[in-house]
Amino acid sequence: QLQVEDDDKIGLYSYKVQSTITSRLANTMIQAKMVNNAKRSQHIVFDVQVPKGAFIDNFTMDVNGITFTSKIREKSEARKMYSQAKAKGKAAGIVRSNALDMENFKTEVNVPPGMRIQFELHYHEMIRRKLSSYEHIISVKPGRLAKHMEVDVRIIEPQGLRYVHVPNSLGDHFDGITTISKGEKKAHVSFKPTMAQQRKCPTCSSTAVDGNFVVQYDVNRETTGGELEIFNGYFIHFFAPENLDPLPKNILFVIDVSGSMWGLKMKQTIEAMKAILSELRAADQFSLIDFNHNVRCWRDNLVSATPAQVEDAKKYIQTIHPNGGTNINEALLRATFILNEAQNLGMLDPNSVSMIVLVSDGDPTVGELKLTTIQKNMKQSIKDEFSLFCLGIGFDVDYDFLQRIATDNRGMAQRIFGNQETSAQMKNFYNQVSTPLLKKIQFNYPQESVSDVTQSSFHNYFGGSEIVVAGKVDTENLQHLESIVTATAANAELVMETLRDVEELDGFVKKDKYADPEFTKKLWAYLTVNQMLAERNTAPTAALKRNITKSILQVSLDHHIVTPFTAMLIENAEKDEIMLADQPKDPRRGCCPGQCLRLTPNAPNNNKGIPAWANVTAVPVSFMPEQRSPPVSSLSINRVDNDPHFIIHLPKSQKNICFNVNSEPGKILNLVSDPGTGVVVNGQLVGAKKTENKKLNTYFGKIGFYFKNKGLKVEITTETITLKDGSYGITLTWSDTGHIIRKQLLVSVKKESNVTITVGEEMSFMVLLHRVWKNHPVNVDFLGIYIPPENQLSPAAHGLIGQFASEPAVYIHHQRPGQAPEKPQATMEVKGNKLTVTRGLQKDYRTDRVLGTDVPCWFVHNSGKGFIDGHYKDYLVPHLYSFLKKP
């Protein structure tokens, strides 16, 4: 807003906002140019709103050619310099005050008649992902009509843009004025209303531009393990996996029904709660507690979210009449008691996530009143695995306190207006925490290559959000950076690996003139300062608090940013006029938004196949067998120019026997069917794009594994790898490198190469991926499978491959020249049959994925007739997980 005494005599000839987002780091510049057309001096106020938590890094002012520039100093030092200047009568002040999710930056200047003045403010922030979208909010409130007005936003995202959307947040008045141009990794949004378009009405002299300009977007995500971006000596790890089943949750709603909630606040809370209860999933457990000076429970224990229970809870909420005082302490202790008791009685699913959601609009007035004591009580009674989320309604609530107890207990707080919007804001907050997808997430990096890593251990990951970890990396002596993320999913332990070339982004960032070359450094500083502020908030001793303050100050000065411990001094070249800008300390609110707490990672344990520096705490060592890759002499199916092509290695007689099976697309062949161990392996055929020499080649396009005794299924296609356990499923793609561990079954994916399935010490299987050129006229992507003869199958095993677990006697004699000199023939006696076989070479693709390794073998004609039991058609099964019906 630009306010002046004599309004019409001030001309705003330019109002410009430029914002550039480089990998979630938004740099924003707001610039206003004005002239005093009055006959006397006037006070001009430059008042802009900056998002809470953003860091102001520069402010300049030009009054008729005299430039004021800024520098950052430690707060008390800056105040001292300011008071000294003020004492000499040389200063004009600057203040910052608060709004809900914005802070005001305000400066006032006396401008002589005819003079021009220009203000320019720079700030940056990290845009967080909420509800599956990044939302960049810019406050645009020029306060008057501007001759030239523009908001210009550029987005540069190396991961690629999924979509860019600009909602009509400034009102229908500006319909169709915003332009969006979007490329694969870059987008440009422009809003340039003419003076006529800015007017509230055709004859109005006031502006309709008054509100927030909003840009929403999301990026592409290839891998489950997240995206590592390395540049300029820093790395940023963005982690936002999707396609996971939600973890069940145990949730207690604790609702303030004291007298101050009467009227609109309560009406809106009831409306929101009814909607929230309807969204609980069948696997969730819940209860409600409402409190004023007393505490009431709808149910004394957690109940399943069945339709009947949810309906009953809604009826209960409808009957609430607010009155009386506020006993927060008692209500929260009752909630933790219910969760602790359920935990002790073994009623909580070990994979579930437990949380308390507190909704309150004021400070305690009954029972324990001391906030620090309530904070201590919560810390002691909440177990390590529970989270506390706090919603503060309106401005009578001590938001700083809510933020502290939430941060202290692995949750977060949010302030919401006590108005018509309350219900929508409550639902929005609930949606952010309603879908826990992972718990106990631990990020690991090689210690010798990285330093100053931000928080790397997280309690929960909620669908639609994003976890961001940053650190410094020694790019001089390192070619690649590897990360390993471990986590617990709904039905398995996950170990995800990501590997990035440290120079991968160099060309992209340096080529783009809008990209901020400092983006990794600023993101690291942003995360580090916010994390230290949160740690300082909950520091148990004064000494620790002082140390953290020192560190925050150092980072703030090094990175030239205004934080609660620094201030900005703005002065002219002669240093005879000085102003001060600092972060406000609102008595009803903490100084600063706390993001997260650092947890200490557990000691590493040396699992096989996973580097020692990766703290794979979630995975007992016995789960991680040696990565046995099946010996090369085993069996392979696969040849790029051939149909399903079997090589059977007979260890006793040291012979390789081959045969082909010609069947049609869609048919499912049984490879292993072992009722003894409960293991099934089937392959589904896919056809080439067209016939060659009157024959349509078929390949394996999908392979299914069923481990009946564990109740686990694994489905591998040329796109995805899925582990299914009952109704739960977890999926990786071929662009991931990672492990899924469930009931001592390990599925290991090697990016774009192979999958190994290992069952304890007893057996392993390898599936190879063959990618062909996407536009190849004939060939399609397909899979090959390798099953080592050492697999411990039972004597009852059957199937095209399984039947050879008990090796038949084979006698080959009468070797003679064949039709081609390199393909001699012979007679083979097996299973009471005499067959003519041909000597030839087959390919094994495990060691050389492109050309394969030649394996000499004796080839059995007519789809293996005489070598396999019965006819190949006997091995067709109806489903991907069917056992073979024995004739």
Image: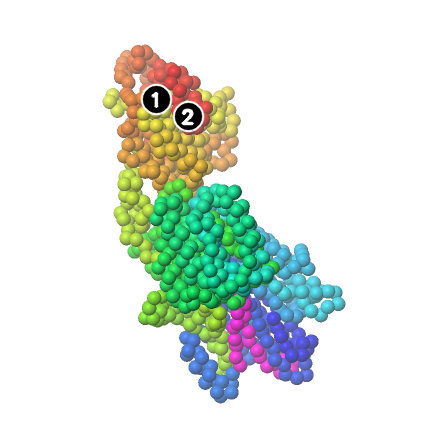
Q: Would residue 837 be found to the left or right of residue 770 on screen?
A: left
Above-or-below relation of 660 to 621: above
Q: Which of the 4 image quadrants contains residue 333? A: bottom left
In space, the residues marked 2 and 1 are separated at their CA atoms by 13 Å
Q: Nearer the viewer, residue 580 or 719?
A: 580
Q: Which of the 4 image quadrants contains residue 199? A: bottom right
Q: Which of the 4 image quadrants contains residue 641? A: top left
The quarter in which the N terminus is drawn is bottom right
Q: Nearer the viewer, residue 441 or 386?
A: 386
For label 2, the residue is 882
Q: Residue furthest left?
A: 652
Above-or-below relation of 646 to 95: above
Amino acid type of the residue tagged 1 in the rendering: His
Residue 431: image location, x then y, percent: 51, 51
Work out whether mark 2 precedes mark 1 in sequence or the reverse, and give the earlier one: 1
Residue range of the region highlighted in magenta in the rendering: 92-118
Judged by its main secondary structure, the magenta piece is strand
Q: Secondary structure at mark 1?
A: loop
The reply to whether residue 292 is in sight is yes
Residue at 42% across / 34% down in the picture? Answer: 715
The quarter in which the C terminus is drawn is top left
Residue 495: image location, x then y, percent: 36, 45
Residue 666: image location, x then y, percent: 48, 26
For label 1, the residue is 798
Residue at 50% across / 33% down in the picture? Answer: 776
Q: Nearer the viewer, mark 2 or mark 1?
A: 2
Q: Is residue 887 magenta?
A: no
Mark 2 crowd level (few <14, some 14–19, many ≥20, 10 Å Cα)? some
The reply to whether residue 25 is in sight is no
Above-or-below relation of 120 to 125: below
Q: Is residue 103 magenta?
A: yes
